[in-house]
Image: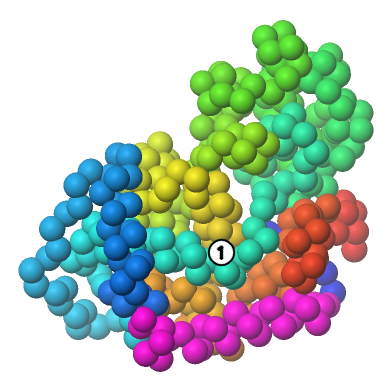
């Protein structure tokens, strides 16, 4: 995904080394075992058990299995403290899920939306355009779009052929042109040119589904929501947070494991990890800082040095998706993406 740049910076190189070092240290040591669900400290256990009981939609915690799960007779080596294959109680699941999120928050303290935007309208349009392409490609394309059509009224009155030409690099440019012009007309006619801050209003706009709506609500309005994109779906199933495959069922199933206030940041943490380390075809298991907590450890490359070569974006020395990322990301060693047409 995205375009590579020639060399990695010292900061990003150190970042990659740090991730690999954490993964090396975590897998075999007793300290890592202490970070698993079964080794959680007493305060975490008490807090998570209480939260699990009170979380909306979570239901009653399931009874713990009487017998431990049988060890697999064959398969990849699992690091010490890895999550069990089965027999995990509801409370243990809640505890492990929240610990994964806390670990990811330490790895990606600067996680943020990877679409460039300055207002809710820009974020809404950019999110619609991001379907079937990378955020980087959208960020390379939208500056020209917003320079020509800065408001919903401007885009609503645009010549579709001119918009198509701008959006061509994003793929499916004719359908996306219809969507962004259509939603702009709806905003201008039904909402006074303002992006609504309610889910039920957003999903009525052309090209806007629940995923897009929650991106806008969480990041433009500060209203918690879970963004179930392809990365999120893949990782929550690998971590056995849910067996659901329908995004609309994954959303409440995962949401029930966490306080509502955590939903937006949780989405960023999971998506960032999916893009950088836990890839679809070949996850970098040997460079993963949460390997001891992952039931799917071993699906990818477990050798730390080989896994390091699979890392993407700033963890592997490459830039993130944004042309204009937040300052916190830059301060932490992140790099802005190259502009459209850059070598």
Tell me residue 129's x, y (percent): 69, 37
Q: Residue at x 51, y 76 (%)?
A: 289
* Colour scheme employed for the rendering of this structure: rainbow
Residue 37 in sight here: no
Q: Residue at x 72, y 46 (%)?
A: 115
- Stretch in magenta: 7-34
Dividing the picture into quadrants, the one containing residue 276 is bottom right
Mark 1: which secondary structure? helix
Q: Is residue 21 magenta?
A: yes
Q: Disc 1 marks which residue? A: 105
Dominant SS type (magenta): helix
Q: Residue at x 22, y 64 (%)?
A: 88
In the image, taking residue 235 as reference, residue 211 lies left or right, namely right
The vertical placement of 121 against 107, above or below, is: above
Q: Is residue 82 magenta?
A: no
Tell me residue 134's x, y (percent): 68, 50
Rendered-image quadrant of the N terminus: bottom right
């Amino acid at each position: 995904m995205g375009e590579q740049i020639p060399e990695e910076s010292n900061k990003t190189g150190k970042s990659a080394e740090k991730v690999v070092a954490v993964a090396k240290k975590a897998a075999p040591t007793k300290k890592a075992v202490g970070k698993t669900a079964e080794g959680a400290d007493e305060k975490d256990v008490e807090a998570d058990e209480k939260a699990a009981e009170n979380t909306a939609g979570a239901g009653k915690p399931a009874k713990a299995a009487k017998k431990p799960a049988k060890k697999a007779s064959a398969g990849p080596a699992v690091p010490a403290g890895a999550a069990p294959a089965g027999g995990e109680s509801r409370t243990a699941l809640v505890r492990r899920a929240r610990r994964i999120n806390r670990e990811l928050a330490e790895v990606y303290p600067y996680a943020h939306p990877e679409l460039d935007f300055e207002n809710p309208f820009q974020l809404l349009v950019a999110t619609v355009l991001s379907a079937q392409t990378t955020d980087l490609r959208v960020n390379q394309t939208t500056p020209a779009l917003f320079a020509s059509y800065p408001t919903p009224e401007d885009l609503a009155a645009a010549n579709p052929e001119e918009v198509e030409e701008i959006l061509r690099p994003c793929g499916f440019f004719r359908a996306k042109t219809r969507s962004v012009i259509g939603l702009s007309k709806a905003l201008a006619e039904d909402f006074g040119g303002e992006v609504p801050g309610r889910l039920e209003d957003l999903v009525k706009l052309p090209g806007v589904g629940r995923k897009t709506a929650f991106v806008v609500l969480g990041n433009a309005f500060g209203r918690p929501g879970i963004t179930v994109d392809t990365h999120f779906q893949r990782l929550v199933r690998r971590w056995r947070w849910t067996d659901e495959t329908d995004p609309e069922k994954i959303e409440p199933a995962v949401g029930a494991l966490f306080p509502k206030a955590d939903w937006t940041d949780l989405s960023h943490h999971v998506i960032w990890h999916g893009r950088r380390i836990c890839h679809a075809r070949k996850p970098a298991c040997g460079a993963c800082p949460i390997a001891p907590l992952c039931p799917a450890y071993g699906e990818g490359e477990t050798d730390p040095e080989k896994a390091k070569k699979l890392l993407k974006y700033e963890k592997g020395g490459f830039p993130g998706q944004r042309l204009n990322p937040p300052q916190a990301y830059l301060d932490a060693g992140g790099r802005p993406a190259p502009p459209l047409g850059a070598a």
